[in-house]
Amino acid sequence: MIWETVIGLETHVELATRTKIFCGCSTSFGAPPNTHCCPVCTGMPGALPVLNRRAVLLAVRAGLALGCTVSRRCAFDRNNYFYPDLPKAYQISQLYLPLCRDGAVDIGGGKTIRIAELHLEEDAGKLVHDPWTEQSLADFNRCGVPLIEIVTRPDFSAAEEVIAYLEKLKLTLQYLGVSDCKIQEGSLRCDVNLSVRPAGSRELGTRTELKNLGSFKAIARAIDYEARRQIELLEEGRPVVQQTRRWDENKDATFPMRSKENAQDYRYFPDPDLPPLELEEAWLDSLAAAQPEMAWEKAARYQTQWGLSADDARTLTGRKPLADYFEAVVELGAPPRRAAGWVLGQLLAALGARGLEAEHIPLPPAALARLIHLVETGALNRNTAARVLEAVFDAGGDVDGYVAAHGLGQISDPAAVEEAARAALAANPKALADWRAGKGKAKGFLVGQVMARLQGRADPALVNRAVDALLEESK
Amino acid sequence: MEFYNLTALELAAALKKGEVSVAQAVQAARARMEARREDNAFLTPLSPAPESIDLDASPLAGVPMAYKDNICTRGVPTTCASRMLEGFVPPYDAAAAEHLTAAGAVCMGKLNMDEFAMGSTSETSCRGPVRNPWDPQRSAGGSSGGAAAAVAGGQVWYAIGSDTGGSIRQPAAHCGVTGMKPTYGAVSRYGLVAYASSLDQIGPIARSAADCAAVLDILRGRDRRDSTSVELPGGPLLDALTGRVKGLSIALPEQYLEDGLEGGVAAAVREAADTFRALGARVETVSLPALDWAVSAYYILACAQASSNLARFDGVTCGRRAPEGRDLAQLCAASRTQGFGREVKRRLLLGTFVLSHGYYDAYYKKALQAAALIKDGLNRTLEEYDLILSPVAPTAAPRLGESLSSPLEMYLSDLYTVPANLAGLPAVSFPCGLDGEGMPVGVQLMGRALEDAAVLNAAHAFQLATPWHKMHPEGGKRP
Amino acid sequence: MRMSEEMADYVAGLAMLELDGEERREMAGELEKILDYMAALDSLDTAHAPPPGPVLPLKNVLRPDEPAPSLPREELLACASARDGEYFLTPRAVE
């Protein structure tokens, strides 16, 4: 039998606010445990939530970019369950009146994924198991970090489509400034709902939910594994059990997680602590009008406006910080195609060698722009410039200072220039003959030859003067 | 005259004039707390030594007072009269406590109550019941029983309570003092341990409507930390007390005077209506059928919200941890089972049930709709009338030990007070007589949202014309 | 509304409460009585009920995305049932 896989995604994305969704504690990642906590986010008695305006703004931006209808009126509900990473024992979320509904994401190849809804909610804390004491250690720094949950319809049929969707989602949200979408830091987390059915069937099979997917690679592998597992079960005539399964990276397999899956009864009800949101049409319109340029729009512009190749444009816009960096270099006067060459060449190589991400480029855009300028004006040749870039990359980017300190700049010793000029003339008797024959261009060639012998570092005026003097001498 | 016969405003005036020092007032309060220890009104008595009270800070600066023990006080245990919160010392003040401290309030301690404010008699406290200062065999009412008893017994001049379904007004009535539930949101709930978030409201219990106005002037104000808080419009409530009710129209819901109401209470309420007539108000009976659903709607909403609000007390991250427990779930269940008393458990079970899968629509959603209808009905009546007059409770204070055996009957006795919570309206309860056994009887006035001043003014007018609020349990019955 | 002991057990499980045999019977009985009384709500015509909502028509109560001080960790952990110097301690959470 031929089987087809049906997949839906629930993606949680942490919003790039400075403070938590319902209190003023910081959302920054990596702080010492339990130092970004207050009575509100740790659910201490009597504490009350107050909604962060920016969380709403970012969520609406995301909804608009994903083609959703933004609800004019929405509200918050409590999702009640006991777990030690949730100190209030309820999560404030949106069930009855979510912020956004009915979006769509074009993932290329003529395929569109429908978004069922996008809503705001709060994140839970983190538990670390201590093997020595058989206890768990709870860190509530992440409690109350704002999240959007984006729920798709079961529109995917393969892992590649899921990855394409996630890549697009990630780019979109990064470009919007909605989230940094770092899957390693957990700011983008994805649960997969998967079932299989005989090809052509209209009914959905029994689904399982896959969790603990820590990378795009893990997502793809887990989908492939789980689809195979379900197909094997069905082919053996055994049923698929509806359950939540955990992906085990080391074992390359999924394992059942919650034994009491059906005992989950979240008892949602409207949160009486939070009045509803009523969004003004005019505000939504102004937000829609102010949506930033998206990656694919930028890539198209790089090609038409600046003549970049499609590949270069796509690579540059593939990471917003890289595109921002590139544009900053161009803004500072570098010719776009040269700038693209440097960013995609030397700069990415330098980043790669250091294991750095594009948002952490230590070299200021102005330094690269200066370097390109020096090359363009012939003050440095390309190889020297590449050496300079490598040398100043982590050291503040003082290009001129480095060039001066290491004598890489113009050679201003007349004797050295004269020596090089003599050698160049001696090596190019034809050019000399041409000059004598009145071909003015030949002098330019000879100047270039002298420059080349001096690795482009000589003062052009000095070179000109030396060449003129020798030509005069040879008359 | 003993200090404890003064109202809070009278004591404050004496303090400002220098006739009495704050230390003397505190000493007098301590002496009364000692004398009335048997009432069991205090859970955590304090001996403040206030040295630098600015007597100009507010009209009540320097006056000793106390808080119901569900209002968080920084550095002072806040237990909600529950074993679950034994040892909990909040690192923050409730907004109400911040306001009062800034106003020069002198805190004498934390007051007994029904556990987590769940009860109508202050008998569900893990520290034993509050006794009514008028008769130690009777309940002081609840859940703010400690607050009402402390004020009635002259231990403090005013107290801060909370009212979710009548928890300020009913004990005030049972103890012969005045209690005010402000418009929902008028006082920040920040730092009030939540029972039912959409119904909870902090308010004063004192010896007169004027005292309540002075306290509410301190408590009121929009708080950035409470999304449901609002600013009461207008100037100081105290300045709005003209004492005139001439020309006001007052509605008296007819079903409130029918079955279930004890004879002595009915008579006292009718007499109160006559007093308002004599003062120049028009009092008419009206029909308000939606009120029949109030108790059901109230208990569904309150218990459901409580089941969520109290879920955080699991002995794991918050609340007293049970000494044993094999695993996480067991430890959590053991902590809750040992930490909560029976009434709390009953309400948590009821509240969990009405939210559980398959029952939400039939119960919780229906109750929300019923509440909306009740609010609508009350608001319509209040378009036609300025105020609604009603009993506070069907009987005077019940005898201790009589109420808990039948939870449903206890719940039904809240029928007069819960509508104000469901509709968020301001309501004041004040003494209007004594029943045949010499126990105080209270009457309630409910007004339009945000018009707390009108409600307090009408009660003030009544108190200018009658002696009931001046009765003291030790000072004989009818003066 | 019949409240069976099984139902009482299910609800107690959700509420994280343990009921022993006696208590389960009694609680189930009490809840049944209360729910019977509440069943009267069924007869309330809510077809024309105004939409439920907060008491006052509040909406869009928001705060700016500005940091406020967190609680010092010692004060935060002092409220915990069990703690070490850095963390809240809980029995081992499965999963």
Image (cartoon, coloured by chain):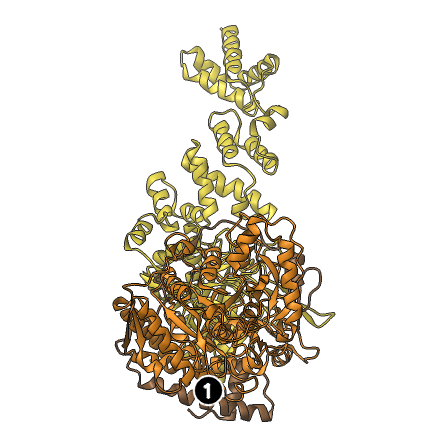
Chain colours: A yellow, B orange, C brown
Residue B416 is left or right of residue B31, and the answer is left
Q: Residue A169's quadrant in the figure?
A: bottom left
Q: Where's residue A295, x and y in %?
A: 39, 50
Can residue A198 be seen here? no
Q: At label 1, which amino acid type do we have?
A: Glu
Can residue A466 be seen here? yes
Q: Residue B257's quadrant in the figure?
A: bottom left
Tag 1 residue: B409
Q: Quadrant of the N terminus of chain B?
A: bottom right
Is B122 in front, or is B34?
Answer: B34
Q: Chain of mark 1?
A: B
Q: Residue A82's quadrant in the figure?
A: bottom right
Q: Where's residue A331, x and y in %?
A: 42, 34
Kindly state the secondary structure of the residue where label 1 is placed: helix
Q: Local crowd at mark 1 within 10 Å, few (<14), some, or many (≥20)?
A: few
Is B295 in front, or is B138?
Answer: B138
